[in-house]
Image (spheres, coloured by chain):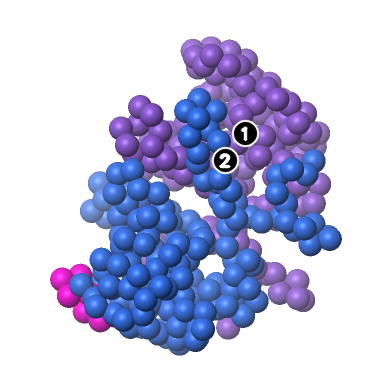
Chain colours: A purple, B blue
Amino acid sequence: PLRVCVCAVVDESNGKVLVVQDRNKTTNAWKFPGGLSDLGENIGETAVREVFEETGVRSQFCSLLSVRQQHNHPGAFGMSDLYLICRLSPLSFRIDFCTQECLRCEWLDLTELAKTSETTPITSRVARLLLYGLENGFQNIDLTMEQMPAVYSGRFYQLYHRRLVFFNQETFTGEAQ
Amino acid sequence: PLRVCVCAVVDESNGKVLVVQDRNKTTNAWKFPGGLSDLGENIGETAVREVFEETGVRSQFCSLLSVRQQHNHPGAFGMSDLYLICRLSPLSFRIDFCTQECLRCEWLDLTELAKTSETTPITSRVARLLLYGLENGFQNIDLTMEQMPAVYSGRFYQLYHRRLVFFNQETFTGEAQ
């Protein structure tokens, strides 16, 4: 079963998001950059690396937004792939995209991506999610990340889940009953 | 990289949750049942199957709650494992647990699991998340699942993300701008 990182690099200053068109597909639909996890990489590392390799843009990982599971993908030998959809923040803006992978690469308005027909259903859906985050605060769409100790190894792992807000607006930290 | 389903089977009628103690661990900590995905299984199928094989309890998949990534697990050959933590609802209640895997298996009060020291940090954390859901509604902790069409294959996939609630309390369905 494959693990794929899908990376939405959102520039909060102007509401643009980094999108690409694949070189080897029949329809030229705008999509988010991304790719397969290497061994030993965590989600954030894969996301930052894939964005840079594909587009030349440097970025930092912000959050996990969504998990997608696809069934019985033809050509995947009966395995179901898992897509981890991440939000990243750009650290550089100049595009220098991989011409072997991409036909085009642009900073596109999120509003435009949310309504264009030249995209995939998933990209369109995530664009609307991001637009909601841009307008109402990303804390409304991000999954909270907590770093916690592993029992047997003494190492750490990351747990992503919904942020819980009590009536007094304090964030649920895990200390509460 | 391994994909593991962790299954919290919560009985809403009495606030109990199904927990096990592993046979082959040095500490006897309460944990949620679970196990590895088989090829071609989706998250819900793995969860229901693993719960039944390990505990004898029949259940149905309700939602994805949380994603956990563990780094550099010793013995995992440098791969990072991904744990998908699910919420399930019981369809039967009689326990007939797998004695090769488990030392004990019980329906435990969520309140007790949330405060006992005889558990792992992750289990304790998820127990508090579930307790919040039990008291305030599971819609506050569940990730929303949407079924969407895949472009090239014509098949379907599942997308899990935060539910967005507008001020008029309508759920964000993806139709909104």
Residue B143 in percent (x, y) is at 58, 58
Real-space CA distance between mark 2 and mark 1, rounded to the nearest whole angstrom = 7 Å
Indicate the chain on which mark 2 is placed: B
Would you say residue A22 is visible in this rendering? yes
In depth, the one of A38 and A134 nearer the eye is A134
> Residue A157 lies in what quarter of the image?
bottom left
* Quarter of the rendering occupied by the N terminus of chain A: top left
Residue B147 in percent (x, y) is at 56, 45
Q: Residue furthest front?
A: B91
Q: The magenta stretch spans which residues? A: B99-105
Amino acid type assigned to the residue bearing label 2 in the image: Met
B123 displayed left or right of A31? left
Q: Residue at x 67, y 34 (%)?
A: A124
Indicate the chain on which mark 1 is placed: A
Q: Residue at x 66, y 39 (%)?
A: A125
Amino acid type assigned to the residue bearing label 1 in the image: Pro
Seen in the picture, residue B169 relative to A74 is either above or below; the reply is below
Q: Residue at x 83, y 60 (%)?
A: B167
- For mark 2, give the secondary structure: strand
The residue that label 2 is drawn on is: B148
Q: Residue at x 39, y 68 (%)?
A: B59
Q: Are marks 2 and 1 in contact (CB under 8 Å)?
A: yes
Residue B152 in percent (x, y) is at 50, 25
Residue B127 in percent (x, y) is at 48, 75
> Residue A97 lies in what quarter of the image?
top right
In depth, the one of B152 and A23 nearer the eye is B152
The residue that label 1 is drawn on is: A121
What is the number of the mark on residue A24? none
